[in-house]
Image: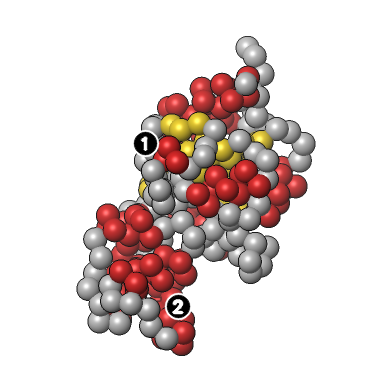
Amino acid sequence: MTAFPFQIVGFDLDGTLLDSLGDLAHAVNHALSLEGRQAVPVSDVRGFVGGGARKMLANAMVATGGAVDDVRFEELHDALLTHYEANIAVETRLFPGGEAMLDALAARGVKIAVVTNKLERFAVKIFAELGLSERFYTVIGGDTLGPGRAKPKPDLLHLMLERGGEGRAAYVGDTTYDTRAAAAADLPCVAVSFGFSDRPVGELGAAAVIDHFDELVPALERLGAA
């Protein structure tokens, strides 16, 4: 068997590895309700995800009547996080084919990482509740390196490589935050079409696009041979 071309594969979390939309939407709508705003449909929340909870809430506020002052925004942001942390894995699950895909990468000796703009403690808690923690050699959150260093900056991916040791790496994501960070880190990026993309998936600038996790290993093999 030909050796697998990547020794490290990193994944974004929301909209890439996990379908977390339902739980995120409930948290956003909880915060909106505290401001007397109408709930937004889950389908609308899909377009708010990608830049972390603060960006998600800001998008929701604009969509439901406009921004609030900074003090009130921080109160609503705290309420969103509190609600989300208490209900973090009620509906959240791996996307179809995710478990088999992780098994396939592990069988090939790949070190698997998670690099997300979600707060690190939330990402760690989700995987613990889903029984997935042991699958990843590291879980890196948007706050792991401190303010201003989340995606689309490459810093979190550089940390992934530092923690992973030697080996060729690739990244898997669903938004421009992911493809831009991967490009800045000089890593090939595979985009998933089933995620929460902030623009049409064909416009993300990914090296490859997949429609199901069954396609990831073959896509990485093709990229590695290119």
Residue 111, image x and y in percent?
Answer: 64, 37
Q: Residue at position x 63%, y 69% from top? A: 147
Q: Which mark is residue 210?
A: none
Is the image coloured rainbow, by chain, by secondary structure, or in one colour?
secondary structure
Q: Residue at position x 56%, y 21% from top? A: 222
Q: Is residue 23 above or below residue 222?
A: below
Direction from residue 26 to residue 173 in the image, left or right: right
Q: Disc 1 residue type?
A: Pro
Quadrant that contains the C terminus: top right
Nearer to me, 179 or 105: 179
Q: Residue at position x 40%, y 48% from top? A: 199
Q: Is residue 184 above or below residue 225?
A: below
Q: Disc 2 residue type?
A: Asp
Nearer to me, 94 or 223: 223
Residue 74, image x and y in percent?
Answer: 46, 81
Q: CA distance from mark 2 to mark 1?
A: 32 Å
Q: Secondary structure at mark 2?
A: helix
Sooner in the amino-acid sequence: mark 2 or mark 1: 2
Dot 1, crowdedness within 10 Å: few (<14), some or many (≥20)? some
Q: Secondary structure at mark 1?
A: loop
Q: Which mark is residue 78?
A: 2
Q: Is residue 7 visible?
A: yes
